[in-house]
Amino acid sequence: MLLPVEKVLTSYSLVTAFAIVGVTMWISYTLSERVTQGRVHGSAIAILIGLILAYFGGLLTAGKQGIADVPMLSGMGLMGGAMLRDLAIVATAFGVRMEELREGGLMGVLSLFTGIFVSFAMGGAVAYAFGYRDAVSITTIGGGAATYIVGPVTGAGLGASSEVVALSVAAGLVKAILVMTLTPFLAKFMGLNNPRAAMIFGGLMGTNSGVMAGLAATDPKLVPYGAMTATFYTGLGCLLGPSFVFLIVKLIVPA
Amino acid sequence: MIAILGITEKNDFFASMTIYGTAILSLSLLIGLSAGRLLGALLGVDADIGGVGIAMILLIFSTDYMKRTGRLKISTESGISFWGTIYVPVVVAMSASQNVRGALSGGVMASLAGALGVAVCFGLVALFVRLGRGKEKEGS
């Protein structure tokens, strides 16, 4: 009985994903309006539901792609993958005024470098506190605290152990999820309500998925500005991590 | 007004199609990502540096140029703006395909390494946002 349905859902997985995400959005916006009286943004609830689904997907399949590892729901991976995500995010820039980007530009660049160094420093300090004494491991885990791409790229460049690389990926994932979930609640505290603030936020946080989802849950109008700076973060982190940051760590922790 | 009049004067036979907008968007993204990769390669890293940002600037400039010359028709526009409006659902799908289990299985150290940086950066955003405002006031 169920088999034909399953077959359709699996072979038309992207269409399945559109339907499921649509229903999730509807549930989330209804909850936002009825239960929280609009205090919690509908997209924030939708993103939370997405993360919970991802957790159960991971438990069910032991895969790395959350709910998208369930064959019927593999379209979620395509819909939320880099290709459509980047297409959609560039489209949000349509209608953005160049002046606003220029105004936030300098603070954006400053935020980028500060964000990268602070993340490396914090991640590295935690690694040190937990008993890591070699510069390679400290830098790699610090890179993970930047983003879950910077960590493994730095680790690969420096020849870190696979255990340390796995830890750095986990640190980066924790960061992304924290930024996704906490941003809408801390938006007021941060003054995150204008394009310039969004550019600062994107530069300091840097984690693409975290920034994009965090801003979407706060105010979708801010998305292009945060994305503009965050898009430079991972690349710069991969550039600075195995070179400049590693040399500094080596000076502090001679091993 | 002049721009609107300009549109009607021109031959609309093939001037307006939704796919034109989507194609402009796609080209911006492809060129931007290639430029980002090139920038990465020039700096010696196997990563994309600012590809999406470059693509956004390309899209802003190209659509602005088309608007000024009256080439940006409504259906062309809708081929771009549709993808912008689908952004939040795409992000929901993205969050549903995150490796949440992996994040939670990293243990105390990984969680702390991630969380501490985030906490400090949240504070820094608040600080930087206010710093920027202070300067603006001094300047004016």
Image: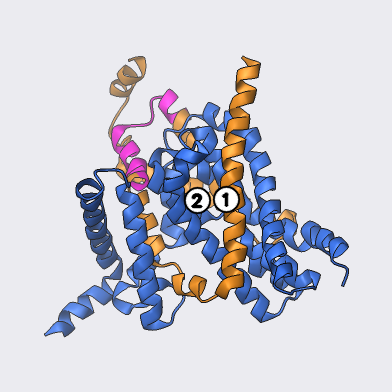
Chain colours: A blue, B orange
Viewer can see residue B63: yes
Q: Callout 2: 10 Å neighbours few (<14), some, many (20+)?
A: many
Closer to the N terminus: mark 2 or mark 1?
Answer: 1
- Give the overall secondary structure of the magenta segment: helix
Q: Which residues are magenta?
A: B65-84
For the residues beneath circles 2 and 1, the answer to whether they share a chain is yes
Q: Is residue B33 above or below residue A247?
A: above
Q: Position of residue A186 (x, y in %)?
A: 47, 45
Q: Position of residue B129 (x, y in %)?
A: 57, 34
Q: Residue at x 65, y 17 (%)?
A: B139
Q: Quick one: A135 or A67, which is closer to the camera?
A: A135
Q: Residue at x 25, y 67 (%)?
A: A16
- Going by the numbered disc 1, the residue's amino acid type is Met
Q: Quick one: B36 or A71, which is closer to the camera?
A: A71
Report in which chain the residue with disc 1 lies.
Answer: A
Q: Position of residue A129 (x, y in %)?
A: 72, 68
Please tell me the numbered disc located at residue A211: 2
- Provide the secondary structure element on which disc 2 rests: helix
Side of B63 relative to B7 (left or right): right
Q: Quick one: A34 or A145, which is closer to the camera?
A: A34
Residue at label 1? A205
- CA gap, disc 2 and disc 1: 7 Å
Side of A255 relative to A138 (left or right): right
